[in-house]
Image (cartoon, rainbow, N blue to C red):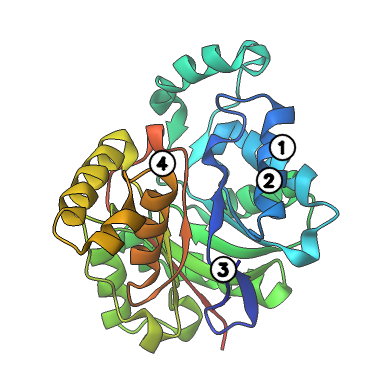
Amino acid sequence: MRPCELSNAGLYSSVLGFGCEAIMGRTVRKDSLCALSAAWDAGITFYDTARSYRYGDSEDVLGEFLRTRRDQAIISTKFGILASQQPLWKRAGKPVARAAVRKRAGSEITSNQFAVATFEHSLNESLRKLRTDYVDLLFMHESTESVLSRDDLLLALEKLVTSGKVRVEGISAAPSIIKEALLKKPRPSSLPSSRSTYSTFRQRPQLPPLNRAGGTGIANHPFGGVAGVQQSRAILREFASTVPAELRAKLGDVGDSVLSDVVLNLILTTPGIQVVIPHDEDDADQRCQFRLASPRP
């Protein structure tokens, strides 16, 4: 697995990351741990989770898996979206039942939770669940322009970086908000590194000048859900019909392996993006969104 450096911060990870949104979704804990183990064996060292994923169970399972590997892994988590306490009957339910339940989970998620006290409690809970005393990247989850102008929140983030609890701070927002944040030249500690949701063939968003800002781009949900996969296959089949026979033979029938190679490599050649993170595509959030994070100078 090819390595990359994140945010010029001396942090190195694999160019492919593991999206932990689906952990404890359709699968039981044992199967979730097996999936994490398979990713690790394949050379993946970047793991992306959040307080809101699976009522906190995502962080808990990830923490269990990485407890003997912590110094070899990059952990990315987020704050700003909170999930209510998961009822016991949902925890005990079978994976299929849980999958049906989570379609109604929107009412159990509270966004825009950026009060400093809430944020600090959220991070402490993340550290407890992850069984670690620091996270490599911490993002403001779906932050808005008003959040980015909050001096109290930015100062709290700075203090956590100084304390060592957070190595790289960042923001999760639409590309337009990220671009505006960079154009306003925020304090150096808040310059971002990015995480994005977009489909390779349908959406090529204009990224902010991350490289010049010292930031890192992290793209997620690269296949655009079931519809995106079908559309990508159709585009590749049409393309295959126009190329020489030798290349057409390599493309074959655009199976899973070929599709993955093309999509992931196209994204990784986008200026400003260093890491791409596939998530549970059936539940892919189709909004175009970026996460940006940057190291303290």
Check disc 1 and report its element: helix, strand or loop. Answer: helix
Residues under labels 3 and 4: Cα distance?
A: 19 Å
Residues under labels 3 and 1: Cα distance?
A: 34 Å
Say whether marks 2 and 3 touch (CB < 8 Å).
Answer: no
Tag 2 residue: 38
Residue shown at 33%/49% (left/top)?
252
Tag 4 residue: 111
The amino acid on which the numbered mark 3 sits, given as a three-letter code, is Leu
Residue shown at 67%/24% (left/top)?
28
First in residue order: circle 2 vs circle 3:
2
Residues under labels 2 and 4: Cα distance?
A: 32 Å
First in residue order: circle 3 vs circle 4:
4
Query: Disc 4 vs disc 1: which is toward the camera?
Result: 1
**In the rendered image, is residue 180 in sight?**
yes
First in residue order: circle 4 vs circle 1:
1
First in residue order: circle 3 vs circle 1:
1
Residue shown at 45%/85% (left/top)?
214
Tag 1 residue: 34
Check disc 4 and report its element: helix, strand or loop. Answer: loop
| Residue 116 screen position, x and y as percent | 54, 56
Which residue appears farthest toward the front when viewing the image?
Answer: 245
First in residue order: circle 2 vs circle 4:
2
The amino acid on which the numbered mark 1 sits, given as a three-letter code, is Cys
Tag 3 residue: 157
**In the rendered image, is residue 197 in sight?**
no
Say whether marks 2 and 1 touch (CB < 8 Å).
Answer: yes
The amino acid on which the numbered mark 2 sits, given as a three-letter code, is Ala
Location of residue 161 by image quarter: bottom right
Q: How crowded is mark 2: few (under 14 residues within 10 Å), some or many (20 or more)?
A: few
